[in-house]
Amino acid sequence: MRYADKIAYLHHDIDDAMRAEIVREEDIPQEIGASLGRDRAERLDTMIYDVIVTSYGKREVTMSDEVLDATNALRKFMFENVYLAGPAKTEDRKAQGVLWDLLQHFEKHPELLPPEHQRIAQRDGPKRAVADYVAGMTDRYALDTYVSIFIPSGWSHL
């Protein structure tokens, strides 16, 4: 399952970066394209096929050295051009602010935690319960919760 997750996350991140116009298909280095494929469909086919063929008859799921090296090069490209690039850093700071505000809010108002997290608060303390609650939120749920707590209702549609 580890390779399936890596392949899926990497391609979702590439799709997101392209939709956000942070990178374009032609920005991906040619040597990666030569090994994995020129576009999303070819890269996915290459990676998935390689995992199946390389793992067939073995006790563990694996990837060939060539495809693994190219996949790691693609991940490195994403780190350098997306994850650690300017727009991502700005968005990261915003996301940290949202999470920090949620942590502070629920620490001040633990009675607003869901019942299971109130039980955790009684057992392990409110900080632990709040941290577990906020850490378990999806991005969308965290943002929706933030908006419902901190943004006046008429403003959220502007």
Image: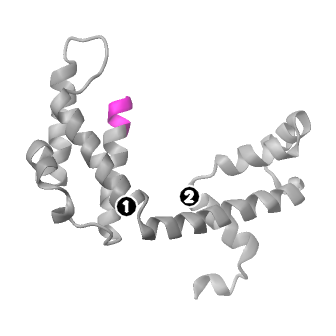
Dot 1: few (<14), some (14–19), or many (≥20) neighbours within 10 Å? many
Q: Which dot, 2 or 1, sits closer to the camera?
A: 1
Identify whether 153 is placed above or below 38. Answer: below
Q: Most extreme residue toward the left, as rendered?
A: 34
Mark 2 secondary-structure assignment:
helix
Residue at left offset 50%, top offset 65%? 89
Q: Nearer the viewer, residue 68 or 137?
A: 68
Q: Nearer the viewer, residue 63 or 87?
A: 87
Residue at left offset 43%, top offset 59%? 84
Please identify the quadrant where the C terminus is shown: bottom right
Main SS, magenta region, reads helix
**What kind of colouring is applied to the model shown?**
one colour
Mark 1 secondary-structure assignment:
helix
Q: Is residue 63 left or right of residue 138?
A: left
Identify the disc placed on residue 82. 1
Q: Which residues are magenta?
A: 1-5
Is residue 2 within the magenta segment?
yes
Identify whether 97 is placed above or below 8. Answer: below
Locate residue 39: give its quadrant: bottom left
Q: Position of residue 20 (x, y in %)?
A: 35, 71
Q: Earlier along the polypeptide chain: callout 2 or callout 1? A: 1
Identify whether 27 is placed above or below 136. Answer: below
Q: Position of residue 8 (x, y in %)?
A: 33, 44
| Amino acid type of the residue that numbered disc 1 sits on in the rendered structure | Val
Residue at left offset 85%, top offset 55%? 107
| Amino acid type of the residue that numbered disc 2 sits on in the rendered structure | Asp
Q: CA distance from mark 2 to mark 1?
A: 18 Å
**Which residue is label 2 attached to?**
139
